[in-house]
Amino acid sequence: MAENDVLSFYDEESPSCSERDVGLNFQYEWLVKVCKRPIGNGEYAILNVSPAFSTAYNGIQFTWTLRLNADCLAHDYLDGGSNGVNVFLYYKDGPAQDVSILDGKITLMDKKGKIIFSDLKIPESEWTRGSGWPAVTATEDHRAISAFLNDNVNSIIRIAVNIRMSAAVFSPLHYFPQLDTAGTRLEDACRKYLCDVGIDPSIVPDSDIVLNEPDVFAIHRLIFNHGCNHLEQALNSTYDKKKIHNVFAHIYFTECVMQSVEGFTDFIRVIEGLRYHNVTGLIREAERFICRKLVSCRKDTGTVKKMLLLAERYQMPVLKMMCAGILADHIIEYTDSARRFDVITKEMKLIAKQIDADDSFSDENKNNDIMVESVVEELKLLAKRMRRVSVSRSSSTTSTKSSRSNSPSSHSPLHICQ
């Protein structure tokens, strides 16, 4: 598959990548000394847990671990005489509570890399955060694997896992409310309401009081909340409440709130104003807006660092994950990563001061150095987890090596990314 074909799936106007069968292959290899651990009553059982590793692409990461687990430690264990051992893949963390994979396979090797058991297919495809599935379910295979692992207690072996995931789950916009099925009737109703309010503000209760306030975000809060209730009553028989609120939030933010935004300072003011008045739906739309625009200017690491601090400060989880993933991908390209982290720390402390200067609600006693150092420590951990994993792009017919972070180059960034 040509690189441009995949890059086009991440168009900033699309929440997902493509409906075509596009997959990303990730491989992690674990060098482990098989050990037995005390489990109580003087008994020991095989139990090893791998370092966490991340399948990362396009700024989105899913974190996993492998686990060697004796059958007697399983929740559904019934056979007291079994000496079985299994290999589990656990989903630790990611942008969603649940995640699906296209394919998962385990390979067991000896210390030198000689394959003993290959392509042991994990039968399950769906994980919930914190859950794990075994690679071996067939009785004959289970016995053979168990014998190999028991024979290699206190010896070093290699375990490789191949995880194939849909490219769609690595689109940042995938983790915001989807708007593609809203329908023109709902969108038209949202715009008609805003038009009616523009003609006659008295439609909104107490608007005569709030309109005299200098705080424009108090006005936004009043109109937005009334609009949600009004549209819900008018369209309840056709659309569910959540869909109405999501679509109205998107239209209100892009067509009303963003009219006054020309640059980064304006955007800081918007986020602070919305947070101060606790307009959750519009805050989420602000995060969506930045993520979408960041797709087209992600190579500008200065902007990415600025947005990472913005995400940390204002609790925007998807934006934070996206920015951290982009920066970690750049960092692992450097051989002297320790020096690179020192440079990043200094740069981000300066950026944090700039954000403070642009923020009229800023707390003068806030310790930005602590925030920056915390963010950098998280970057170090993420880079370490990503470095352990190789990634390639594939479809039903082809597979080529890929960078974890790719983005379209045909879109020019808006002022927010300058």
Image (spheres, helix red, strand yellow):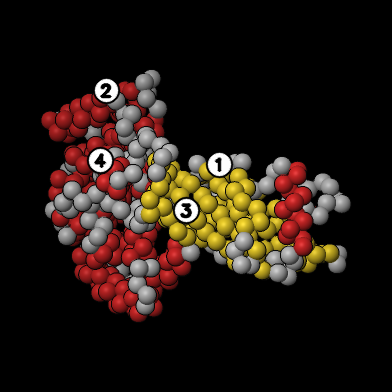
Question: Counting residues from the N terminus, which is met first, the one under dot 4 or under dot 1?
Answer: 4
Q: Amino acid at mark 3?
A: Phe
- Label 2 and label 4: CA atoms lie apart by 21 Å
The C terminus lies in quadrant: bottom left
Q: Amino acid at mark 2?
A: Arg
Q: Amino acid at mark 4?
A: Glu
Looking at the rendered structure, which numbered label has been put on residue 263?
Answer: none
- Label 4 and label 1: CA atoms lie apart by 28 Å
Q: Is residue 33 above or below residue 325?
A: below
Q: Secondary structure at mark 3?
A: strand
Question: Counting residues from the N terminus, which is met first, the one under dot 4 or under dot 3?
Answer: 4
Question: Counting residues from the N terminus, which is met first, the one under dot 2 or under dot 3?
Answer: 3
How crowded pointer 3 is (Cα within 10 Å; few <14, some 14-19, many 20+) is rated as many
For disc 2, the marked residue is 185
Question: Counting residues from the N terminus, which is met first, the one under dot 1 or under dot 2?
Answer: 1
Q: Nearer the viewer, mark 1 or mark 2?
A: 1
Q: Is residue 43 above or below residue 103?
A: below
Counting labels gives 4
Looking at the rendered structure, which numbered label has been put on residue 126?
Answer: 1
Is the C-beta separation of discs 1 and 2 under 8 Å? no
Q: Is residue 185 visible?
A: yes
For disc 4, the marked residue is 13
- Residue 376 position in % (x across, y down): 39, 71
Please give left or right for residue 276 compared with residue 202 in the image. Answer: right
Looking at the rendered structure, which numbered label has been put on residue 26?
Answer: 3
- Residue 31 position in % (x across, y down): 60, 66
